[in-house]
Every structure is written in structure tokens, then in C-alpha cells.
């Protein structure tokens, strides 16, 4: 079945073409490299994995309760719309929201793959090219995973959200080589990491938790890469150049805040757009959700040296300024550890199964003897 047959709304042209600008850069220095980045490159090679084998795709998913999210978290809960819905309709609403959320993850991962490939092409340092090549493979794997999850387990896909499309387009059209880092590694990846983590830590459904845990293990490396590369480079920029990048971050953060409403879903259930925006804007759960989503972006932006007054004022307006003091290293270490723990439990189950199988074979042989 073609993916186009699964779209909830018409996605438009089958291919989105973004005109590219900027130079492809070669480096003839093959021996020199930053120790931290080369160590991250080695880790990127060591941590490659096969989504077909590492993830248990046999786990069942109820498409009408994909994540086990409480009804109270739904924008329509407690409204006349919700009261008029049958249980079947409410299940379908949950399915659409889960599809919308994971569809944005999917489109974002394809964007990350393209941005990582752009970094390989445009970044001047070979050590960064090496690592970006491993990230390109990581992002391809993530797009593969989310696509399979949506097609096989949910059976519904949503087009890319306008705000995400806008930020991706701005990131890819900019000719400066550091902008794919800033737009993708810091903003889009940072937001995705926080969203992944919130769902991973709240869902009681095994397959989405497994997928998000393993994807986050990769993403922790990607954010570390962006921080290393940009921190070094931004120390060399003038105040005017730094302010330009801060302005890009401010605009991107507002776009990402507006992206989180899921208004498209409510429109598909007959709710006028203006009313859908009002309902989502004042949902208590969504307001908390938004704040948590910036928990990875704000400390990263501060760490790479973008912390001017314009940016801080924007974060005050968004209600997230205090997140600049979040310990990003601790969060990423936890992401790695949770994936390792999941692997350990899986290996223990497989070992118990093998021992039981051997025991049964021995017992069967003894009975035949």
C-alpha cells in the first residue's frame, strides 16, 4: 500500500523541493581532528544498530489507544464536543492525535537526515564530516522506524505541519554552513528529544516506549555533536553575527511553540480552526507539555554561547528562561542508560528462553532414551 493512501489530509505534491545554496567544502587535512569529535565519531560507529532486529515489531498496538494517554490530556476533554462523542469516536480521536504526533516525528527525522547530509557537504572540518556521516545513517534508521510504526501499527499518517515545514525550509535554504546545525541539531532535535522523553516516560505501551528509548540514545549523541561544533565556532563570531543567529533561534522557538497544537486533528473532527486554536491554547496539559518541550533547547542554546538580551526576553515571554540551568549532560546520560537497561532486560529474557529451550531438549532426549 502506498503511504499516500494512509494520509488523513492531502499532503500535496509527492516531493518537496527546497532550493539549496552555499558551497560544498573539501578538506585536504586528513590527520588532524578534535579529540572529542573523533571520540564521538567512534561512538557513532560503535552504536549503529538494525531497527528490524533490535525492536520487537511483534508487540501489539491498539490503534485507538496507541500511547495510553489519559483522556484528561485531550484538548476536547470536558467540552460539549467530547460529551457528544461515542467511545468509538473518542478512540478514533486518540488514533488521530497519535498519528499526528508520530507523523511530525517522521517528517522531522527525514529533515534531520537531509540536514546531516548537508553538514557532510558544507562543514569545513573533516572530523565533523566524519561524524555527520554516521548521523545521516542514524536519521535514516529513525525515519524507517517511524514510517513502519505508522503504517503497520497505526494505519494513518498526517502531512508535515506548516510550522515544521517553515523551520526546515529556513534551515536548508540558508547558505551559512552552521545553520543546519543550529536549526536541526539545536532546535528541531532538541524539541524532538524532549517530546520523545515525555512520551517515553509516561506511556505504558511497550512498543512505542521501546522505539523512543532507542531513538533517544542516538539523539543524545547528535545534540552533543551540535554543541561541540557550534560552541567552538561561535567563539569566533562578531556580536552582530551572534545576534543574527539568536534572532533565528527566537523565530524558530516561536514556530515550534505554535507547531504543538495539533489543530489539524481537531479540524478533521469538524471543529472550526479558530475554535480549535482556542481550545488547544488553553489546555492546561498542553501548556505544561510546551514548557517541558523546551527543556533540551534552552540549556543547549545557552551552552553554545547564544544568550543575548533579545533571546532571554523571548524565553521570559515563553516562560522557559529558568530552563537555561538544566543539566543537559545528566539528561543525555540518562537517555543512554535507559536504552542500555532496556537491552539488558531483553538479553536476559532471550537467555532465559534459550536455557528453557535447552532444558526441554535435554528432557525430551532423556524420555526418548
Image (cartoon, rainbow, N blue to C red):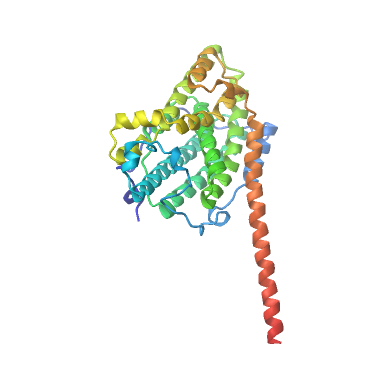
**In the depicted view, which residue is nearer to us: 11 or 226?**
11
Q: Number of numbered discs present?
A: 0
**In the depicted view, which residue is nearer to us: 196 or 179?**
196
At 64% from the left and 52% from the top, the residue drawn is: 343
Residue 345 picture location, percent across and down: 65, 54
Decide if residue 115 is on the left or right side of residue 7: right
Is residue 340 something that shows in the picture?
yes
Is residue 24 something that shows in the picture?
no
**In the depicted view, which residue is nearer to us: 94 or 311?**
94
- Dividing the picture into quadrants, the one containing residue 38 is top right
- Dividing the picture into quadrants, the one containing residue 134 is top right
Q: Quadrant of the C terminus?
A: bottom right
Q: Is residue 333 above or below residue 239?
A: below
Furthest residue in direction bottom, as rendered: 369
Residue 44 picture location, percent across and down: 62, 42
At 53% from the left and 12% from the top, the residue drawn is: 309
Residue 155 picture location, percent across and down: 38, 52
Amino acid at each position: 500500500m502506498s503511504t499516500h493512501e494512509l494520509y488523513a489530509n492531502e499532503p500535496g505534491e509527492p516531493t518537496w523541493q527546497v532550493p539549496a545554496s552555499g558551497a560544498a567544502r573539501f578538506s585536504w587535512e586528513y590527520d588532524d581532528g578534535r579529540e572529542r569529535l573523533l571520540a564521538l565519531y567512534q561512538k557513532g560507529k560503535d552504536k549503529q544498530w538494525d531497527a528490524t532486529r533490535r525492536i520487537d515489531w511483534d508487540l501489539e498496538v491498539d490503534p485507538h489507544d496507541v500511547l495510553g494517554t489519559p483522556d484528561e490530556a485531550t484538548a476536547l476533554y470536558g467540552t460539549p464536543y467530547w460529551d457528544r462523542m461515542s467511545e468509538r469516536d473518542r478512540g478514533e480521536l486518540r488514533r488521530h492525535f497519535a498519528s499526528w504526533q508520530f507523523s511530525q516525528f517522521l517528517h522531522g527525522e527525514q529533515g534531520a537526515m537531509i540536514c546531516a547530509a548537508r553538514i557532510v557537504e558544507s562543514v569545513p572540518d573533516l572530523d565533523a564530516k566524519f561524524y555527520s556521516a554516521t548521523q545521516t545513517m542514524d536519521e535514516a534508521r529513525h525515519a524507517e522506524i517511524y514510517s513502519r510504526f505508522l503504517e503497520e501499527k497505526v494505519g494513518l499518517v498526517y502531512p508535515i505541519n506548516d510550522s515544521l515545514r517553515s523551520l526546515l525550509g529556513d534551515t536548508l535554504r540558508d547558505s551559512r554552513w552552521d545553520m543546519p546545525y543550529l536549526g536541526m541539531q539545536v532546535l528541531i532535535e532538541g524539541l524532538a528529544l524532549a517530546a520523545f522523553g515525555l512520551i517515553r516516560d509516561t506511556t505504558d505501551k511497550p512498543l512505542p516506549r521501546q522505539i523512543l528509548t532507542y531513538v533517544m540514545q542516538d539523539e543524545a549523541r547528535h545534540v552533543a555533536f551540535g554543541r561541540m561544533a557550534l560552541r567552538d565556532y561561535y567563539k569566533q563570531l562578531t556580536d552582530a553575527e551572534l545576534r543574527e543567529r539568536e534572532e533565528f533561534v527566537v523565530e524558530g522557538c516561536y514556530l515550534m511553540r505554535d507547531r504543538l497544537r495539533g489543530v489539524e486533528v481537531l479540524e478533521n473532527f469538524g471543529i472550526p480552526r479558530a475554535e480549535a486554536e482556542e481550545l488547544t491554547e488553553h489546555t492546561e496539559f498542553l501548556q505544561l507539555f510546551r514548557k517541558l518541550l523546551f527543556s533540551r533547547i534552552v540549556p543547549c542554546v545557552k551552552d553554545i554561547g547564544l544568550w543575548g538580551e533579545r533571546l532571554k526576553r523571548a524565553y521570559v515571554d515563553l516562560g522557559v528562561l529558568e530552563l537555561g540551568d538544566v543539566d543537559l549532560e545528566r539528561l543525555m546520560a540518562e537517555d543512554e542508560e535507559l536504552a542500555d537497561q532496556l537491552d539488558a532486560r531483553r538479553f536476559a529474557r532471550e537467555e532465559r528462553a534459550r536455557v528453557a529451550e535447552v532444558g526441554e531438549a535435554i528432557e525430551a532426549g532423556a524420555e526418548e532414551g
